């Protein structure tokens, strides 16, 4: 079974694409909605919360866990990989590496914009990793602290959300008008992609808006192709629950209602406590 973790609903945008490409596996989704957003929290807190989630998913029988959260990938992934897990038992992968590998070949101006949470922006992970791919890139980041709270509160399609879409995009494009490729560096943001693209076309900006779902799904497929031993482990759960499902630290009903909407299918969820 494969575990998919996010601070809240954002990871569903990744789960959705992974399930479409790799329907043969079981998936256990965990959203730490009660403690979202992570993006404005300190390194120590994000690390601690992410580690709790990884341990929980592993206990449930997930031998492969995707941190479907840029903030957790930026702030906690490396420490967890190096310090906390035994790779012979569980593998933990993030979403930033596949994204930065995808982008450089797509830009013509070589000016990239990154929209992300304050935590991801402060980590500089995208800047560092993109420049490793191509040192001639010009990377401009924009923190969007209001987007995750709006999405978690179900207010992202409201007119009020337009104000914050315009605000962050204007700030980004004023700082670098040569940007032709924008990375949505937070897995929640595809849920407002229509608003983002509507604003860009209204201002006559033609640019590539990069979302991570398909990129991460293909990168995972490639990873599994290269690691048949992991395929064997995730295909035959020796312990824990089987069949996958949805877990949340918030109310199960609230999660199920919103997640059913985001995934366009009826889902049931279970409340759990992380500690
Ligand atoms: N989906 C998370 C990400 O990709 C949002 C983090 C948050 O809770 O602020 O960064």
Image (tube, rainbow, N blue to C red):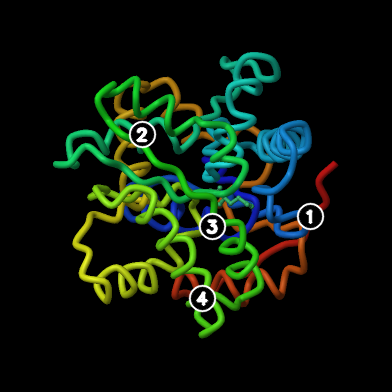
Residue, far front: 174
Q: Report the mark closest to the observer, 4 or 1.
A: 4
Which comes sooner in the sequence, label 4 or label 3?
3
Q: Tags 3 and 1 in contact by the CB under 8 Å rule?
A: no
Indicate whether 2 appears above or below 144: above
Q: Which residue is mark 1?
A: 272
Q: Are marks 1 and 2 in contact (CB under 8 Å)?
A: no
Q: Which residue is mark 4?
A: 163
- Which comes sooner in the sequence, label 2 or label 4? 2
Question: For the residues marked 3 and 1, what is the alpha-carbon distance in whole angstroms?
Answer: 18 Å
Position of the C terminus, as image quadrant, is top right
- Ligand 1 neighbours mark 3 (CB distance < 8 Å): yes
Residue found at x 41% / y 61%: 169
What residue sits 27% from the left and 30% below the top? Answer: 137
Residue nearest the viewer, comparing 184 with 121: 121
220 left or right of 34? left
């Amino acid at each position: 079974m494969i575990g998919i973790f996010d601070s809240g609903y954002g990871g569903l945008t990744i789960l959705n694409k992974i399930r479409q490409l790799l329907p043969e596996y079981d998936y256990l989704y965990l959203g730490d909605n009660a403690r979202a957003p992570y993006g404005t929290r300190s390194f120590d807190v994000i690390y601690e919360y992410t580690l709790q989630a990884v341990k929980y998913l592993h206990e449930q029988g997930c031998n492969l866990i995707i941190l479907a959260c840029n903030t957790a990938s930026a702030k906690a992934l490396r420490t967890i990989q190096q310090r906390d897990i035994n790779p012979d038992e569980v593998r933990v992968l993030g979403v930033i590496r596949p994204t930065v590998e995808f982008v450089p070949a797509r830009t013509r101006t070589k000016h990239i914009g990154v929209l992300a949470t304050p935590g991801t922006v402060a980590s500089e992970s995208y800047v560092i990793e993109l420049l490793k791919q191509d040192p001639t890139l010009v990377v401009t980041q924009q923190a969007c602290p209001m987007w995750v709270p709006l999405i978690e509160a179900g207010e992202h399609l409201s007119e009020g959300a337009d104000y914050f879409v315009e605000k962050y995009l204007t700030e980004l494009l004023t700082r670098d008008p040569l940007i032709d490729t924008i990375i949505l560096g937070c897995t929640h943001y595809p849920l407002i992609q229509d608003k983002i693209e509507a604003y860009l076309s209204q201002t006559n900006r033609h640019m590539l808006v990069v979302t991570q779902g398909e990129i991460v799904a293909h990168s995972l497929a490639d990873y599994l192709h290269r690691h048949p031993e992991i395929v064997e482990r995730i295909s035959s759960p020796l312990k824990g629950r089987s069949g996958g499902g949805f877990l949340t630290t918030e109310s199960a009903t609230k999660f199920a209602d919103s997640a059913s909407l985001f995934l366009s299918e009826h889902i049931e969820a279970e409340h759990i406590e992380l500690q």
